[in-house]
Image: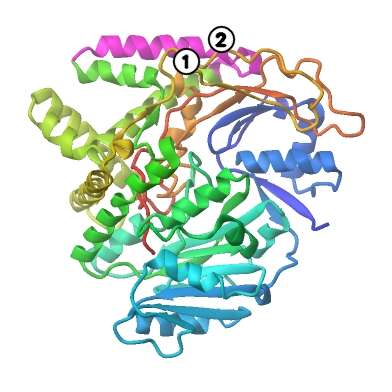
Amino acid sequence: MTPLRVTADAGLRRLNGGRLLLGGSPYRVLRLSEAGARLVDAWLTGTPVAGLPSHRRLAARLVRAGVVHPVYGSARLTGRDVTVVVPVRDHAEALARLLPAVQDAADVVVVDDGSLRPLPGATVRHPASRGPAAARNTGWRLAGTELVAFLDADVVPDPHWLGPLLPHFEDPDVVAVAPRVLSVPGTSLLARYEQVRSSLDLGGAAAPVRPGSRVSYVPSAALLVRASALRSSGGFDERMRFGEDVDLVWRLAAAGSLVRYEPASTVRHAPRSRWRGWARQRFEYGTSAAPLALRHGRAVAPLKMSAWSVAAWAGPAVGRPLAGLTVAGVTAALLPRKLEAAAVPAAESLRLALYGHLGAGRLLADALTRSWWPVAVPALAATRRGRWLLAAAYGCHVREWYQRRPPIDPLRWTALRALDDLCYGSGVWWGAVQHRTLAPLLPDLAEWPGRDGVHTETGPDLRDTPPAAAPPALGPGPAAAAAADNDGGGGGGGGGSSRAVLLTGGGAATGATAPAGEDDGSTALAGGDTTTGTAAPARGDGNGAGAAGAGPGVQAG
C-alpha cells in the first residue's frame, strides 16, 4: 500500500484539544473522539496514515471534506501511462511550442478541429470545426493508456508537471486532477491584469473540486483524467460550446468520484493579446451559465446565501440600517445556542457569524455588479441611496487592489474589474435569452423559513447505530461562512469558500462507537445546512483571492 501522509488546509482551525475541526470546503464543523484527535495530531506532525481500514476511512473523510490534503510517498503510474490529447484549430505556432514539452508521455494525439490550413502531423482531422468538446472526445477515444492528459495548444507545461499529479491516482476514488494554470508574463496592461486575474488560474491552495467548494471547477485547458472515467461518463458534452469542462467535472463529482486541484503542478497559458478578444472571451464564459443551470440547477446560482443575511443587508439598502443590524445581531446571538451541541465555543460561534455577515455583503455586491448588473446597476444609479450602494460595491475592487497590490494603479484596476464583470454578466443574460430560462439569474436563498436545510451524516463505522434527531436548521446562515470572507488561497474558480455547510456533532454521536478494532476516531455527524456563499464557478480571480459570488463563469480552453 502506498504510504499516505496528510497536511492541514490553510484554513483549518482546531479547538477543544483537537477534537473540534473547523474548516474545509464547503466550510464545516467536524467533531472527533479523543482517539480520532490523537490520530489527526500524529498525522499533522508527519506520521503516515496506517494501513488499518478504519484509519484510512477517517483520513479519506477528512480529505473529502477538504480539511486536510493527501501527500503520497510515491506513484505507481508514470508518464508512460499518459496519453496527451491536444485539441487545436489554426494555432500551428502554439502547437509547435507545446509538443517538445510533452515528450515524456506514452503518446500524443493532436486533433485538428477544422483548421483553415490542415496542420501537418495531426493525428486526426475534423473536416469542419466541431468544437473543443468534440475534439477532446475524438482524442481520448484513441488513447490506449490508463490516463489521458488534456492540454490546449496555447498551454506549455512546466518541466516535471506530471510529478505532483500522478500520486493522487493512488486513491482509487480520484478520477481527475488538474494543475495550476498560470498566465504567461508580459508587460502590457492586459498581460499584467491577466497575471493577477487570469480566467484559468484557480490560486495556490490545493482543494477538492465540486460545486460549492473553494475550487468548484477546473478547466480542461490542462486536466489529467482516468480513461475509465471518460468512458463511463461519455466524456465531454458536445452540445456545449463553452462550459463543457465544468459540466464534466460536476458529473464526475455527482457520481461520487473525487476530482482534485493540485497547484504544485503548473502549466503556462498564453492570454488573449487584444482587448477585444479578451472581452469576447469573458462574454462567452458568461453564456455557458444557462446551459449549466439547465443541467445542474442551483449549482450555478449567481448568489447563494442565507435569507437571514439577505435580510440583514436589505435593511441598510432600503434606508433601515437599524433593522438590518437587529437581524444581524439576533442571528449572531442565536448561533452559539445552535452550535452548543457540537461543543463550539461561544466566542468562535460569534466570530463565524460576524465573518459570515461581512462575507455575505461581499457576495451580494459581486452579484449586483456582475451577473445582475444589466438590471441592478441602472436601477441603483437612479437614486442617491443606490449610488452610495454602487460605490460601496465597486469599492470591493479597491479593497482587492489594496490586499493584492497588482502591478496596476488602483483606478485602472477598478475600471478593468468593472469591465470584466460587465462582459461576463452580459454573457449570462445573453445565454439566458438564448436558452429561454431565468435559471442562471436566480439566487439560491437556502434558508428561507420552512425550507429544510438539515441533513444527517453518520460515521463510516456506525452502520448499526440509529442517529438521534438532527438539530434544527441553523437559521443564522452566516454561521458557516468564515471562509466566505477568508480566501485562504482559493482561486478565481471556486470563489472563496462559496457554499458553507456546517456538520455539527449534534446528539447523533452520543454513546455511538465503531465495531471493536475498527474505531476510526470520528463521531456520527448530524448537520444543519447553512449557506453564505456562491457555488458558481467564477472565472478570473487567480493567485488566490477568492471571488465568491462572481458567478458561473466557464472557459472555452
Residue 414 visible in the snapshot = no
Residue 69 visible in the snapshot = yes
- Residue 464 image offset from top left, x and y in percent: 82, 23
Residue at the extreme right of the image, as rendered: 516
Residue 181 horizontal side relative to residue 10, left or right: left
| 426 or 24: nearer the viewer | 426
Which residues are drawn in magenta? 319-347
**What main secondary structure does the magenta stretch of the protein show?**
helix
The N terminus - image quarter: bottom right
Q: Is residue 518 above or below residue 336?
A: below
Number of numbered discs on residues = 2
| Badge number at residue 475 | 1
Q: Helix, strand, or loop for circle 2?
A: helix
Residue name at image x 78 percent, y 32 percent: 36
- Residue 82 image offset from top left, x and y in percent: 62, 73
- The quarter of the picture where residue 111 lies is bottom left
- The quarter of the picture where residue 168 lies is bottom right
- Residue 349 image offset from top left, x and y in percent: 53, 19
Residue name at image x 56 percent, y 43 percent: 254
| 154 or 264: nearer the viewer | 154
Disc 2 marks which amino acid? Arg
The answer for how far apart the CA atoms under marks 2 and 1 are is 11 Å
Residue 214, magenta (yes or no): no
Earlier-in-chain disc, 2 versus 1: 2
Q: Which residue is mark 2?
A: 337
